Image (tube, helix red, strand yellow):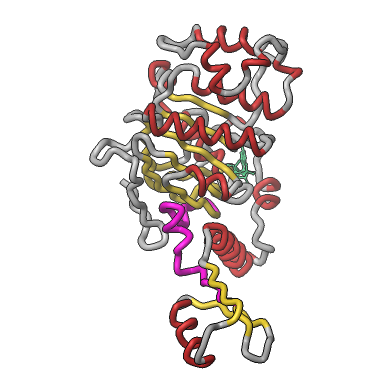
Amino acid sequence: MTTTPAPTTAPTTAPTAAAGAAPVVEAHDLRMRYGSTDVLRGVDLEIRRGEIFALLGPNGAGKTTTVEILEGFRQRSAGEVRVLGTDPARADDAWRGRIGLVLQSWRDHRRWQVAELLTHFATYYPDPRDPAELLDLVGLTHQARQRVDRLSGGQRRRVDVALGIIGRPELLFLDEPTTGFDPEARRDFHDLIERLARTEGVTILLTTHDLAEAERLADRIAMLVDGRIRACGTPTELGRRAAAQAEVRWTAPDGRPRHERTSDPSGLVWELHQETAGPIADLEVRRPTLEDTYLHMVHRQATDTADTDGTDGTDDGAHRTGFPAGADTGEAAA
Ligand SMILES: Nc1ncnc2c1ncn2[C@@H]1O[C@H](COP(=O)(O)OP(=O)(O)OP(=O)(O)O)[C@@H](O)[C@H]1O
């Protein structure tokens, strides 16, 4: 169950989620501490089958840490986690065969040809996708005989995606999947992700810095800021958040451009209409967007941090200098 406090973190069930089905991902009060630094400070998540769920957050917010814990690659410091009904910290190979990963860092096998690599990885799974179909699916048919280390960055990323879905995963983790993609490749990738979720019922958790990508793809978005989920909802709900105000622009009767921020744009427009007793020139109402909400969250966290610890509110450097030797072993240091 997601138990984060309303209203800022109140989750909504995505339209595509199978109502009543057990969540595919559940995390409750998930915590991670590296040395003396708390990176995750009580994360609550619930992702339902067939949902495309985006985890957004600034650099160093803890997105990769969260995802690595859910993937079973990193031991958490505290909290309850269930992925496909199993605690990832105790998962076996059968469980691993049900998830697909597209990680941030490139793996080995640079000298392999693309088709050769896919054919090889297909042998690890009981019911793999056909490598030729997969090449077509990710748009790499013409690169089938090319060596991986001779591909462009975006093409390598497509190989990553192909390897992530070759075993027909029920749950696919995508860590910043479209980094290095040109606009066309990004659009093709978005179509592929939607197809996987909508027609094959694959549950997808993606981390991204790209707000437009999250808005375009995700059924729900969670904003991870300073180790906590600060907001969660559909892109529309997050865009509508009261924290961000609408902006009204118009040209006054004296010809001067005017603008005002307000949480009641219709009220303001009504008042202007009464004042001018006629049409309002160049009237524009800009509703708050997902980006406004996101920037508001991040800015608020930076301000809070600066108020409480006297720093400038950016946590990245502080965490790095606080690392103990050997902290990158993934060992929890609770
Ligand atoms: N193995 C580790 N040992 C110690 N600290 C770590 C380790 N891995 C990550 N951190 C720190 O934890 C914080 C969260 O890192 P994480 O990579 O999870 O963030 P992120 O949200 O994925 O960032 P980005 O968007 O930049 O990829 C950062 O301050 C990072 O420096």
Of 142 and 94, nearer the camera is 142
- Quadrant position of residue 23: top left
In x, y percent, where is residue 268? 48, 83
* Residue at 71% across, 28% down: 153
* Residue at 66% across, 17% down: 108
Of 153 and 101, nearer the camera is 153
231 within the magenta span: yes
* Residue at 62% across, 90% down: 253
In x, y percent, where is residue 239? 48, 60
Whether residue 87 is visible here, answered yes or no, is no
Query: Magenta residues, as a range?
Result: 226-249
Q: Is residue 191 left or right of residue 47?
A: right
Whether residue 195 is visible here, answered yes or no, is yes
Q: Which quarter is ligand 1 in?
A: top right
In x, y percent, where is residue 163? 55, 19
Tally of numbered discs: 0
In x, y percent, where is residue 188? 57, 32
Of 261 and 316, nearer the camera is 261
* Residue at 41% across, 33% down: 197
Residue 277 vertical position relative to residue 156 in the rendered view, above or below: below
Of 273 and 139, nearer the camera is 273
178 within the magenta span: no
Q: Is residue 309 left or right of residue 82?
A: right
- Quadrant position of residue 179: top right
Q: Residue furthest left?
A: 20
Residue 89 vertical position relative to residue 205 in the rendered view, above or below: above
Q: Residue furthest front?
A: 278
